[in-house]
Amino acid sequence: MEGVGGGGAHYNPRTVEEVFRDFKGRRAGMIKALTTASVFDFRENQRSENIIVLATLAFYSVLDVEEFYQQCDPEKENLCLYGFPSEQWEVNLPAEEVPPELPEPALGINFARDGMQEKDWLSLVAVHSDAWLLSVAFYFGARFGFDKADRKRLFNMINELPTIFEVVTGTAKKQVKEKSSVNHGSNKSKSNTKVRGSESQGKQSKALPQKDEEEGLDEEEDDEHGETLCGACGENYASDEFWICCDICEKWFHGKCVKITPARAEHIKQYKCPSCSNKRSRP
């Protein structure tokens, strides 16, 4: 059993990469406790050659959430949900040290259990769990003197992952699988917009390849660009959705996230995302 307080008394990640690994481990453990979904919901972009292993992990996830529910007895004292770097979780009383070695998660998560529907209660715990994970990560950053660049890099790494709340509520999965009403020609608009924008700046285009309807390159495109994330919502690239790239910061966005339609994109020579549009040059 790892120490109360979420990580063991002597575990102190000191680099951005170590803190991020710590964050992912704690996050994975807490998602196990809060979801009944398959392993894919809490191991994004990870694959296994053994489907039996995946099925087993998914089965244990179901057992975890049932065990978590039972442990959060409203008749008990203030309980907290802890996640550990080893991808394990624990329901326990808060640390007795004042101040605690690490930031503490929300107290009394058990008290609201019977007064809400289970899915709503799990979602509420998920929101507080997200806040706790961020506080722990940036606690390490402050303790070990991360500078502005390190803090920004850590946040960007964290921000590429769906939140626990998004996983628990199914929002992350829905957004990835959501079917857009935009047809295949819209994907061409996405690429063409980026090409025009790049040419106006004299830069090489970084457009995603157009979908080849005749040769059926859907799977290849998804594999190659599945890691591309929307700069607004943080979700992955999908070949059946309309995307547009900012010619200033070169981030990709869902058209729906920045309110750009394929038809409108055809008339944009240089696209600026909302963030870059709001930046005003100083005299």
Image (cartoon, rainbow, N blue to C red):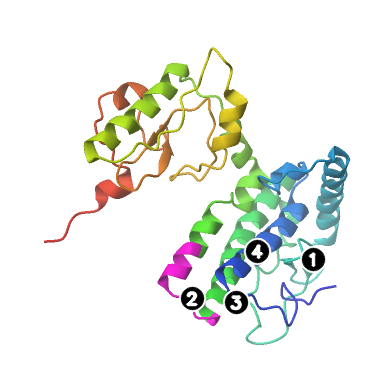
- Mark 3 is on which residue type? Arg
Q: CA distance from mark 4 to mark 3?
A: 11 Å
Secondary structure category for the residue under label 1 = strand
Between 97 and 117, the one nearer to me in the picture: 97
Pointer 4 residue:
21
Q: Main secondary structure of the magenta part?
A: helix
Image position of 272 (left or right of 148): left
Q: CA distance from mark 3 to mark 1?
A: 24 Å
Q: Residue at x 76, y 45 (%)?
A: 39
Give above or below for 111 relative to 243.
below
Quadrant, the C terminus? bottom left
Pointer 1 residue:
90
Residue 14, numbered circle: 3
Secondary structure category for the residue under label 4 = helix
Q: Where does the image place residue 270, in percent across and percent down from the top left?
A: 25, 36
- Mark 2 is on which residue type? Phe
Task: Please give the range of residues in magenta.
Answer: 143-153
Residue 263 can be seen in this image: yes
| Mark 3, other Cα within 10 Å: few <14 / some 14–19 / many ≥20 | some
Q: Where does the image place residue 44, in percent across and percent down from the top left?
A: 66, 46
Secondary structure category for the residue under label 3 = loop
Q: CA distance from mark 2 to mark 4?
A: 16 Å
N-terminal of the pair, mark 4 or mark 3, is: 3
Image position of 266 (left or right of 106): left
Pointer 2 residue:
146
Q: Residue at x 44, y 75 (%)?
A: 147
| Mark 1, other Cα within 10 Å: few <14 / some 14–19 / many ≥20 | many
